[in-house]
Amino acid sequence: MEENKNTAKEGAAPVPEEHHGGKFMAGRRAFLGAFAGCVGALGAGLVGVPLLASFTPVQRGKPEPAIMNLGDIPVGSSEQGVYAGYSFIVFNRKSGIECISLKCTHLGCTVKWEPAKKIFKCPCHDGWYDEHGINKGGPPPAPLEKLDYKIAGDKLIVGGA
């Protein structure tokens, strides 16, 4: 009499072949192989995209100035803009125009102007500056950068002075 190779013990029920390899193991191996491939591709993308982006050319020379209408900034108000890829704020005070970069001097985060408190607050590490950009608390090592500007007619040209 032929003996069943899939029997664990004599007299026990036969074990289905798909649990000893067969189709079940082949399907599982294929799934794990595909899963590992997807995870590897995702990891390569997470590393590769920033790496390739770092090869983009850096702007050389002087960036284009930001041009604003002085009529849009009445005395006692402020207006935000972008110069050289970073945000800035222009204050039109009774004492004159003041252009301040919103790039924190600690790690380069964008600080937020809080007009009610008259302070700049950095959301990254809780640093803060007074209304003129002077560092007053937290880790920022220096005041916010004052941007050069010039006035031509009714235009305020930031960064082109």
Image (cartoon, grey):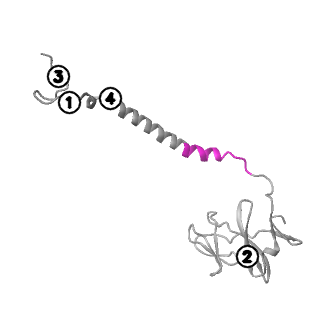
Quadrant where the C terminus lies?
A: bottom right
Disc 2 from disc 3: Cα separation: 88 Å
Disc 2 from disc 4: Cα separation: 71 Å
Is 90 rendered above or below residue 32? below
Q: Residues within 10 Å of mark 3 (few under 14, many from 20)?
A: few
Quadrant where the N terminus lies?
A: top left
Q: Residue under label 2, please give it.
A: 78
Disc 4 from disc 3: Cα separation: 19 Å
Please identify, in this view, whether the residue under mark 2 or under mark 3 is nearer the observer.
Answer: 3
- The image quadrant that residue 62 belongs to is bottom right
**Disc with the residue nearer the chain's start (4 vs 1):** 1
**Disc with the residue nearer the chain's start (2 vs 4):** 4
**Amino acid at pointer 2:** Ser
Q: Residue under label 3, please give it.
A: 4
**Amino acid at pointer 4:** Lys
Q: Which residues are magenta?
A: 45-58
Q: How many marks?
A: 4
Q: Residue under label 4, please give it.
A: 23
Q: Residue under label 1, please give it.
A: 15
Disc 3 from disc 1: Cα separation: 10 Å
- The image quadrant that residue 157 belongs to is bottom right
